[in-house]
Image (cartoon, rainbow, N blue to C red):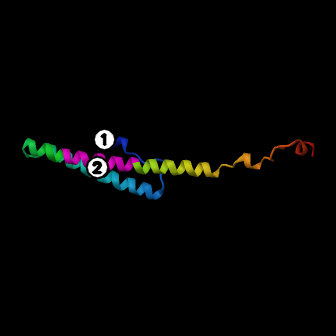
Amino acid sequence: MSLSSINGSSGVSSAGSSSIALLQKEAQSIQKQITQESKSSDDAKTKARVMMMLEVQLQQIEAQIQQIQAKAAQAATSSAKSTTTDTTAQQPAKPTSKIDKLA
């Protein structure tokens, strides 16, 4: 697992950015633990079990980062949509009867 897939998004709020930064630090720590465990003198069965648990934790962290980024992207999209003006509301209503058309 590499951290290259764990990047902050430009649309992430400062709270989201700090959350991502903390999660990235945690992911780096887990990667160090994986490296240490791979070099440890534990028997193969224990080593595999510990490394598997660490890999699961790392995947959970990556999923959390992706959720934060997705929420930020969704919020940015919603914000952009709400700031655009609705031009249809500004157009006058079209006449519906012959009397309205004559006026």
For badge 2, the amino acid type reads Gln
Dot 2: element: helix
Q: Specify start and end residues of the magenta stretch as a single range.
A: 52-66
Q: Is residue 80 left or right of residue 35?
A: right
Q: Quadrant of the N terminus?
A: top left
Q: Residue at x 73, y 49 (%)?
A: 89
Q: Which mark is residue 2?
A: 1
Q: Which mark is residue 85?
A: none
The CA distance from mark 2 to mark 1 is: 9 Å
- Say which quarter of the image contains residue 19: bottom left
Q: Which mark is residue 28?
A: 2
* Most common SS among magenta residues: helix
Q: Is residue 37 left or right of residue 77?
A: left
Magenta span includes 11: no
Q: Residues within 10 Å of mark 2 (few under 14, many from 20)?
A: some
Dot 1: element: loop
